[in-house]
Amino acid sequence: MLESKRKAIIFLILAILLAATSGYLILQKVQSLNNDLGSFVTVYKANGEISSRKIITPNDVTTEQIPQRYLRDEYITSDAELRNMVSLVPLSEGEIITNSMLKEASAITDENTRIISLIQSEKVYFDEVLAPGDRADIIVSHEFDDEPVTEIFMEDVSVIQTANQSGDFAGARLEIPFDRVTELVHLQNYADSLRVVRANVSENEPSGEVETPQDESGDGEEAENENNNEENDSEDESDED
């Protein structure tokens, strides 16, 4: 009886040691995975369907925890980044929101316009780096009646956003009137080349000499002095007579 009891105690101790060892190894493995993944951060995603040009409200978004190593620079990690913002594209439920999808509501004012992306390529050229808020002209070269034609397609187009690739300027998103969208897309696909140039804005200040108003009181004094001199001359002549 004592022998069987002793064996039972030994097996119990071994089971406890094995369980503790297994738990320790599992904990070490979990910690190793957490170290590889890094800490978790909060990102924002669509809580439902969000239409384009709609101001994003707190009810439109929800949060999700992702490992730090999977965090991308364009992910939204603070609700402050969503204030007074609209989505440039329709968002599906569960889609992670990025900076490139958003624009300030004040910059999208006309519902009769659309945002068209022009990315630098063999057909699309940018004379210089553009920035949001710039104005640009679009010049197109194509064949018309078998004759090469270069003409200004649009003037003073608003630059809404720029695109970058590997840190370099790669293109721009332009605000185009809705009735010209199909023309631009057609030219983008079939024209020989599209050239986007910055539209210079100059302020012409009025020039010319500023006329200094004459002092009326001074003129009056001079006239009065002349009258006094004439009276004195007439008195002298009368005395001589």
Image (cartoon, rainbow, N blue to C red):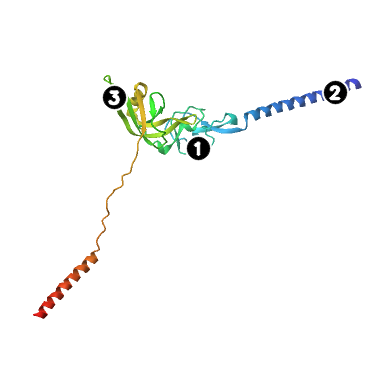
Residue 131: x and y in percent read 42, 36
Specify whether 164 is left or right of 203. right
| Residue drawn at the location 15% of the way across and 72% of the way down | 230
Mark closer to the observer (1, 3):
3
Circles 1 and 3, Cβ within 8 Å, touching? The answer is no
Residue 12: x and y in percent read 82, 24
> What's the CA distance linking mark 1 and mark 3?
45 Å
Circles 1 and 2, Cβ within 8 Å, touching? The answer is no
What residue is shown with label 1? Answer: 81
Name the secondary structure under disc 3. Answer: strand
Residue 62: x and y in percent read 53, 32
What residue is shown with label 2? Answer: 10
Label 2 amino acid?
Answer: Ile
Q: Quadrant of the N terminus?
A: top right
Label 1 amino acid?
Answer: Glu
**Within-10-Å neighbours for mark 3: few <14, some 14–19, many 20+:** few
**Residue 90 lies in quadrant:** top left
Check the image and name the residue furthest to the right.
Answer: 2
Q: Nearer the viewer, residue 196 or 184?
A: 196
> As displayed, is residue 142 above or below residue 60?
above
Sequence order check, earlier mark of 1 and 2: 2
> What's the CA distance linking mark 1 and mark 2?
62 Å
Q: Quadrant of the C terminus?
A: bottom left
Name the secondary structure under disc 1. Answer: helix
| Residue drawn at the location 41% of the way across and 39% of the way down | 106
Label 3 amino acid?
Answer: Val
| Residue drawn at the location 51% of the way across and 39% of the way down | 80
What residue is shown with label 3? Answer: 149
**Residue 30 lies in quadrant:** top right
Residue 195: x and y in percent read 36, 28
